[in-house]
Image (cartoon, helix red, strand yellow):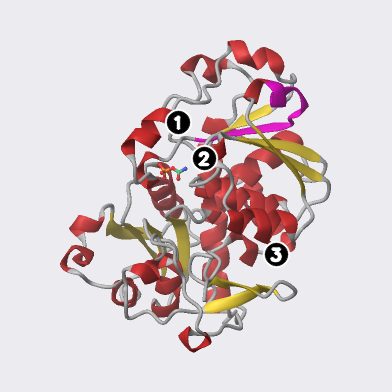
Amino acid sequence: MRSLIDIAELSLKELDELIRVAEDIIAHPDRYAGKCAGKKLATLFFEPSTRTRLSFEAAMLELGGSVLGFSEANSSSAAKGESVADTARTVGCYADIIAMRHPREGAPLVASRHAGVPVINAGDGGHCHPTQTLADLLTIYRHKGRFDNLTVGFCGDLKYGRTVHSLIAALSRYKNVKLVLISPPELRLPGNVKWNVLERCSMAYEEVDSLEEAMPELDLLYMTRVQRERFDDPAEYERLKDRYILTADKLKYAGEDMCILHPLPRVNEISVAVDKDPRACYFEQVLNGKYMRMALILKLLEDAKNGVCAEEDVTIGAESGLRCCNPRCITAVEQELEPEFHLTDAEAGVYRCVYCEQRAVR
Ligand code: CP
């Protein structure tokens, strides 16, 4: 069964096709109104959401299907201790496709192995958020008309910002994309993204701490919220939360056609006055998310109908002596899950946990 857990599972051709379908939905919504009649989408949200959950639901409703689900863990039997695998297997009896958000990294992958229907990762901890990337890509395409030859600034919480990790993974596959990573040292891009994506793709990047100095060279500026819910120490969050605030005044450093993106929700990092600037694209991203999720639902249901399977990953288990030490990984709390690792750098002998992509240790 084909799911979408990580953006890397979609080929460049498939990304192009999703964008083409989304554009067609925008131009001819009436042609898509009954495409999912009789189909059900389950939205299983173990973590808060406004955009992702409601845009998935709006997407399915506009395709003529129906929706069921829950919006917090406490209203599901997870509150009684039910595992992700059993929850997914249960919901797979009621729904044709599932969108799942979970605070534990790797939980949607576990769900995809047990649901018997396609599972879409709607955000797992600080790991990844592939459908936000689809929204980002459509927005970039509509404004820039290309993905090659771009200089992209990512600003804020690059450590825990799962939307950053997924968008970087997508951009790493295009030509001549340069990244400017703007963050305090404490919130820099984690090793699994830096080494596994940037270094492996020989992608040009620099790490800086001044937004004003970076802005003049940027085609796109991707602002992010500091992810309070991922911090162990509230004082550390308080110290870092307002490090970057994009104001209308600071935009004097930016080019006339720089696009400002943000996955939202925002807290303080973009002042409301910036919303009026023609370069502000973040509410367009919200709308584009619905169209891309419509295109994705259509694709995954079509793949399921045609028996398209996910590619098999070659993995090794606990007998290898490897362990995942990430406390946010689903394997840290669901003890019955078999640890699994895949080789990501044969030369250096680097294995990573298949659930959370953190480097495994012996
Ligand atoms: N961008 C995003 O994931 O927003 P929500 O948390 O509101 O779904």
| Dot placed on the residue nearer the N-terminal end, 1 or 3 | 3
Range of residues picked out in magenta: 213-224
Tag 1 residue: 240
Q: Is residue 216 magenta?
A: yes
Tag 2 residue: 186
Q: Which image quarter: residue 248?
A: top right
Q: Is residue 81 left or right of residue 128?
A: left
Identify the element where label 3 is drawn: loop
Determine contact: label 2, label 1, CB under 8 Å. yes
Q: Is residue 254 left or right of residue 316?
A: right
Give the alpha-carbon distance from disc 3 to disc 2, as whole Å: 33 Å
Instruction: Tell me: residue 317, above or below residue 115.
Output: below
Using the rendered image of the protein, determine whether residue 259 is visible from the camera's viewpoint.
yes
Tag 3 residue: 11
Identify the element where label 2 is drawn: helix
- View extreme (top): residue: 249
Disc 3 marks a residue whose amino acid type is Ser
Q: Position of residue 47 (x, y in %)?
A: 33, 51
Q: Position of residue 150 (x, y in %)?
A: 78, 39
Residue appearing at x 71%, y 41% in the figure: 141
Q: Is residue 42 magenta?
A: no
Determine contact: label 3, label 2, CB under 8 Å. no
